[in-house]
Image (tube, grey):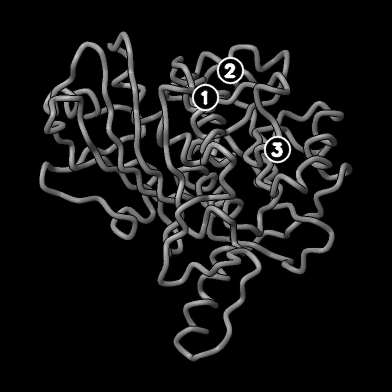
Amino acid sequence: MSDRKLRVGVAGATGAVGRQLLDQLAEAGLPVGQVVPMASTACTVAQLEVGGRSVRVENCIPEQIRTLDLLFCAVPAKAAGPAIQAAREAGVPVIDLSGTLGPRQGVPSVVPAVSRRALQDFRELPAVASPRPDVVALASLLAPIREDAAELWCRGVVLHSAAAFGRQGVEELSDQVVSLFNSRAPARKVFAQGLAFDVLPALGEPDLAGWTADERRCAAASAALLDVAPSALAVTSAVGPWFNGLCLALHVEVEPALSAEACREMLSGAPGLAVVAARALPHPRGVDGSDRLHVGRIREDPAGRGVHLWAAADELRLGAANAVSILAALVEDDLL
């Protein structure tokens, strides 16, 4: 492992995910000499707190990107292209959280606890995609079960929060709550049908078969990490009326059969997971600020077909924690 101190940039630092990255980089104990918050030239935020001190927000332009040893890209996908292109042209390694890079571009999608070996070619192609929190959660939860299973099937519901839509989603939900209490017309730029005091039964528009692009993306990305067919995973992606927090209600079947007790034993101590006491019920507010996915309500199916379980996580923190764990793996394996 090198003793070099890294200069690490965070593009999109003023957004919800970017701010989580700043916090976690300050806490991670990695050989990072300087964290550089970066935003578009239109951004009006001049300073951000990093590790207890105020740091200037730099313009996310090629001249600044070239000074970095690594760039986290936490910019919305529609705006991420220029930053990623500038980094790759300058030979600056990229950890992408925007969804711009992935297997279609020849870039591995990595959850270190599940697919760390995919980082072995990082020197040849210095770019890696950190999946969205729902994929991180599904892969982290199912990987210990998949390890000893010949076959695995999973069905269930993934409940996202307003944070899945970034800072704009959180702010609009807050505005909707206040507006409805004060009998005002709420803002509906992000959530056209509203979200306050309601649940959106689909994240995106269903296709003719009834599935959304987000559901297909989640299944395909999770299946690739777990080495199962995408058809083995079928999740309904919905949105709940809370600011931050991811919940999963899953029914998992494996071959050979799995008992609830065996499932609990498999998940206990697995990287990135916290299995709660048998009667405890993890919920979004209760796990706020935690890097891990909290798993509970592990119980056997009444018909003897696998197990049912519930899990909850801090949606923003889980996604950022995975990206920071990629950096930790790269440092540990001397790939930077």
**Residue 85 image offset from top left, x and y in percent:** 83, 34
Marks 2 and 3, the one that precedes in the sequence: 3
Disc 1: CA contacts within 10 A as few (<14), some (14-19) or many (>=20)? some
Nearest the viewer among 163 and 326 is 163
Q: Residue at 76% of width from left, 69% of height from top?
A: 44
Q: Quadrant of residue 150?
A: top left
Q: Is residue 47 left or right of residue 228?
A: right
Residue type at numbered disc 1: Ala
Marks 1 and 3, the one that precedes in the sequence: 3
The quarter in which the C terminus is drawn is top right
Residue 324 in view of the camera:
no
Labels 2 and 3 touching (C-beta < 8 A): no
**Number of the label disc, if any, that sits on residue 119:** 2
Nearest the viewer among 336 and 205 is 205
Q: Does residue 117 sit above or below 198 in this rendering? A: above
**Number of the label disc, if any, that sits on residue 329:** 1
**Residue 188 image offset from top left, x and y in percent:** 62, 71
SS state under label 2: helix
